[in-house]
Amino acid sequence: MTNTYEQISLTFVRDRVKEFYDIMDTKKDASIDLYIMNSVDEIKSYLYTKGDTKTLEVCGHRAKLPCNFKRLVSVVSNCCDANGQHYYYDNFEFDGNCIYKTSDNKVFKVEQGYIIFPSNFEAEQVDIYYIGYLTDEEGFPMLKKAHVPYYVRYAAYWFGAKIKDSRYSLYANYARVRKNIIHNENVEDGLYDMDNIRRDMYAGLMTKRFSFGAIYQSPYSGNT
């Protein structure tokens, strides 16, 4: 039986795609790698992600996101706005492009690896609570041996379509492989239980450098 948690390298998968298309050089490696990483995102398995927190420096109303960033949960700062309210972004509405809007009409962007705040945002640091990819030492998503059939089929299909190689159609069933994986393991289909994630993250706030007990009352305080 395949060990679902056994890790493999990205090269392991790339070599199989290259072998299928009889590619001997390295010119197209980066393109194949991108499709492999897209397959990790598309499979949406809980095995690839974790909830995490980071303190970011804000410069010119921009804060650089961690390299393993996938989805934003909330943004908190101990700095106050012009109304004396601490900056707090939560319960986002996303326009499908890059603009986020909170329930109290605060608007900001996540674009090209940065959070971009409004021009009146004065905080010099923020804490973000986010869903991030588990990555290896080189910053690539950790690949799972049990998911190799999906990686290869997905990458071979889309890469083959890009280079207009008719053999790509042999992997048109890649979505069925994902369906089998979903059936055989507990895979979240892109829908996170955000309340539980927030509770877990707020529970860790007391170990952070900000003293939120005095300046911020979590909406989950006391909840179980």
Image: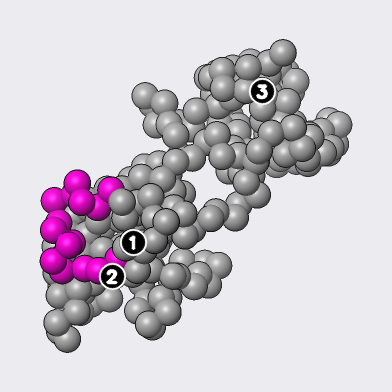
Q: Which residue is mark 2?
A: 88
Magenta residue span: 204-218
- Asked if the magenta segment contains residue 205, the reply would be yes
Residue type, numbered disc 1: Gly
Please tell me whether residue 114 belongs to the stretch shown in magenta. Answer: no
Residue 146: which disc?
Answer: 3
SS of the residue under disc 1:
loop
Three-letter amino acid code of the residue under disc 3: Ala
In the foreground, 80 or 34: 80
Q: Are marks 1 and 3 in contact (CB under 8 Å)?
A: no
Q: Position of residue 173 (x, y in %)?
A: 84, 37
Callouts 2 and 3 close, C-beta under 8 Å: no
User: In the rendered view, would you say 101 is above or below 98?
Assistant: below
Q: Is residue 200 left or right of residue 214?
A: right
Question: Is the C terminus in the top left, top right, bottom left or bottom right quadrant?
Answer: bottom left
Q: How is the image coloured?
A: one colour
Sooner in the amino-acid sequence: mark 1 or mark 3: 3
Confirm whether residue 7 shows in the render.
yes
- Residue 52, placed above or below residue 31: below
Q: Amino acid at mark 2?
A: Tyr
Badge 3 element: helix
| Dot 2 crowding, Cα within 10 Å, few <14, some 14–19, many 20+ | some
Q: Which residue is mark 1?
A: 222
The 10 Å Cα crowd at callout 1, few under 14, some 14 to 19, many 20 or more, is: few
Viewer-closest of 205 and 114: 205
Residue 34 on image: x %, y %? 56, 37
Left or right side of 210 for 137: right
Q: Residue at x 35, y 79 (%)?
A: 106
Gap between marks 1 and 2 measured at Cα: 19 Å
Quadrant position of the N terminus in the picture:
top right
Among the two numbered marks 2 and 3 on one chain, the one whose residue lies closer to the N terminus: 2
Q: In the image, which is nearer the foreground, mark 1 or mark 2?
A: 1
